Image (spheres, rainbow, N blue to C red):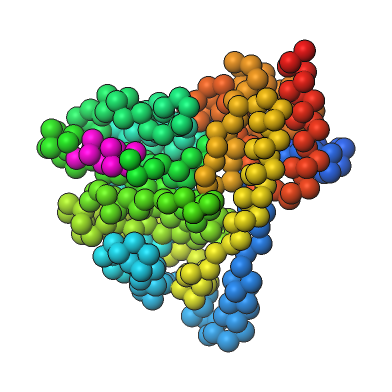
Amino acid sequence: MINEKMYALGSKRSIIREIFEYCKQRAVEIGADKVFDFSIGNPSVEPPKEISDTICDLIKNENSVLLHGYTSAQGDLGTRQAVADDINARFDAGVTANNIYMTCGAAASLTISLRALLNPNEECIVFAPFFTEYRVFIENAQGKVVISTPCEKTFQVDIKDFESKITENTKAVIMNSPNNPSGVVYNEETIKAVCATLTAKEKEYGHPIYLIADEPYRELIFDGVPVPYLMNYYDNTIVCYSYSKALSLPGERIGYIAVSPKMEDSVNVYLAICGAGRSLGYVCAPSLFQQVIKKCIGAKVDVNIYKENRDILYSALTEYGYECVQPDGAFYLFVKALEDDAMKFFEKAKSKEILVVPCDDFGVKGYVRIAYCVDKQRIVNALPAFKALAEEYNK
């Protein structure tokens, strides 16, 4: 017999992927310009030019056997040192190359970290709304998902609710800022309150509770909004990072795990991460792109393109009567459906060729996510359909 749980995951894609696949089919049927796809967080901004220049230079001038060969299981030492130096220059976190594990993107970073930390039936708290795959990653590590509901209007953490969800079995907490799907950045007040709560609970229960910072959107920030670096607020922190959004490289699958050197038993935690990477087959992240990252460590995409998209969409939708969460980062708009049932709203939007993601699976009912990492013209072309949808509900 096959593994029935794996069959279930494979036979039914996530709702995001289902909508994305539908969009591709619909584009063939009626033309891509007539389908307003806002389903998937696939960066629409080109990678910085230095990325492609560096790739060409490496391929042309480096020893091809070495360039495409294995690195150390945890990653090339020079790349890990470059990552550590960058973290220290920006956040003064005191990390070294031996705190860094190179990975195939943030999904690998999270699955490795969870496998390293969780024993069977230990609990991991996630803050709603949350990326749907967290549930898959946690349960695959034999952990239990516990959902903390947010403050209703701001979507900051509801500290009282969070505290009530922590038990003796709590082993980890995932914090994603800027947040997918809301675009909310957790402010310093929230961060300090979360960390103070965790510190008190660690003392109460007599064991570490790890804070996992999921940071693929850290660089996608608008108007200079600060994003607190969690290692500087809580010692037992692991940072899971991806260059997918910061450098528009989602298909290249390159990222890292950073273990705080101030963490209780940090050396053994890092070794557990190495062991988890080994057990999952996540060793030796793509060699070419480790070298690219080493040489392009400070590169960034032009976030003003996303900001312009956000401003156009947010301004228009609020004018039409939609209730939207103001996003300070990432490239998502979290919109309250115009009826209680987000799936029914999704179907009505779909009838006008607007493809958004209903967010019940994100832990918050009655909302949809709009990924505005698309060509600006798609947004402009979609606005009449969004307006017509709102008017249909207002009749």
Q: Residue at 59% of width from left, 41% of height from top?
A: 332
On the picture, is 172 further left or further right than 181? left
Looking at the image, residue 252 lies above or below residue 345: below
Q: Quadrant of the C terminus?
A: top right
On the picture, is 173 further left or further right than 366? left
Q: Residue furthest top?
A: 395
Q: Give the total of numbered labels.
A: 0
Per the image, is 316 magenta?
no
User: Residue 386: where, in percent of width, then height?
Assistant: 75, 30
Q: Nearer the viewer, residue 274 or 380?
A: 380
Q: Residue at 59% of width from left, 31% of height from top?
A: 324
Per the image, is 192 magenta?
yes
Q: Which residues are magenta?
A: 190-199
User: Residue 378: where, in percent of width, then height?
Assistant: 77, 44
Looking at the image, residue 330 lies above or below residue 365: below
Whether residue 76 is visible, yes or no, is no
Q: Residue at 55% of width from left, 55% of height from top?
A: 245
Q: Main SS of the magenta segment?
A: helix
User: Residue 346: where, in percent of width, then height?
Assistant: 68, 25
Toward which corner of the image does residue 60 lie, by quadrant?
A: bottom right
Whether residue 71 is visible, yes or no, is yes
Looking at the image, residue 62 lies above or below residue 235: below
Q: Residue at 47% of width from left, 35% of height from top?
A: 130
User: Residue 29: where, in percent of width, then height?
Assistant: 86, 37
